Image (cartoon, rainbow, N blue to C red):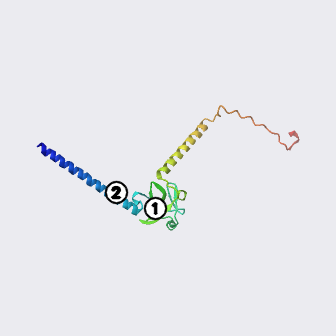
Amino acid sequence: AGSWRASTAILVARSFSSTLYFRGAAMLSILHRFESLRQTRGDSLLTVATARVVRRDGVHFQGLRYVSPLLAAYVKEQVVIRYDPRDISEIHVFHKNQYICKAVDPDHASSTVSLKEIQEARNERRRQLRSQIKERIAVVVDPSPPASAPAPEPARTKKPRLRTYLEDD
């Protein structure tokens, strides 16, 4: 009875390891297919789709303006943009599931800017503005001048040079 259990355990272990082997091979196959799809479709599987309206000056997204000469024909039209969150310096524009063009942000055309970097910069700027507002509110609430500043001198009254009346002397 003990040898039957041992042989059954060995068979289960072998089938389990072969199952893992086949799963690993299947995963590699899927990864290779994914890589080929990514290369042929230009990373469209890794992009995020968002609907936008084309304006006269381009497509606006995340506070950035994306331009392309081909967008002029689609002003006031609803389009779908696809962007890579790792690099939002360029977007791909689609109209009715047809690819139109690649639009570029002229301010960041030569650099790679991630969505996360933009959000962090905005949060930092928001914190700076919030601290400035708190400082100004503190000054308004407590308008007394600082102790180290000397008291201002009273303004001297100057005599006007022009004599208009005889009594002005």
Q: Position of residue 21 (x, y in %)?
A: 26, 53
Location of mark 1 (residue): 92
Name the image quarter holding the N terminus.
top left
Residue for badge 2 = 31
Residue 96 appearing in the image: no
Specify few, some or many for label 2: CA neighbours under 10 Å numbering under 14, 14-19, or 20 or more: few
Q: Work out whether 142 lies above or below 20.
A: above
Q: Secondary structure at mark 1?
A: strand
* 15 vs 56, nearest the viewer: 15
Q: Amino acid at mark 2?
A: Leu
Disc sitting over residue 58 in the figure: none
Image-based side of 54 in relation to 25, left or right: right
Verify CB contact (< 8 Å) between mark 1 and mark 2. Answer: no
Q: Quote the CA–CA distance across marks 1 and 2.
A: 24 Å
Q: Quadrant of the C terminus?
A: top right
Q: Secondary structure at mark 2?
A: helix
Amino acid type, mark 1: His
Residue lying at the far top in this picture: please name it.
147
* Side of 15 where 89 appears, left or right: right
Residue, far left: 1
Depth check: 137 or 125 in front? 125
Answer yes or no: is residue 51 visible.
yes
User: In the displayed structure, would residue 86 be above or below residue 40?
Assistant: above
| Residue sitting at x 18%, y 49% | 11
Residue 97 lies, in percent from the top left, at: 41, 65
Residue 66 versus residue 135 in the image, above or below = below
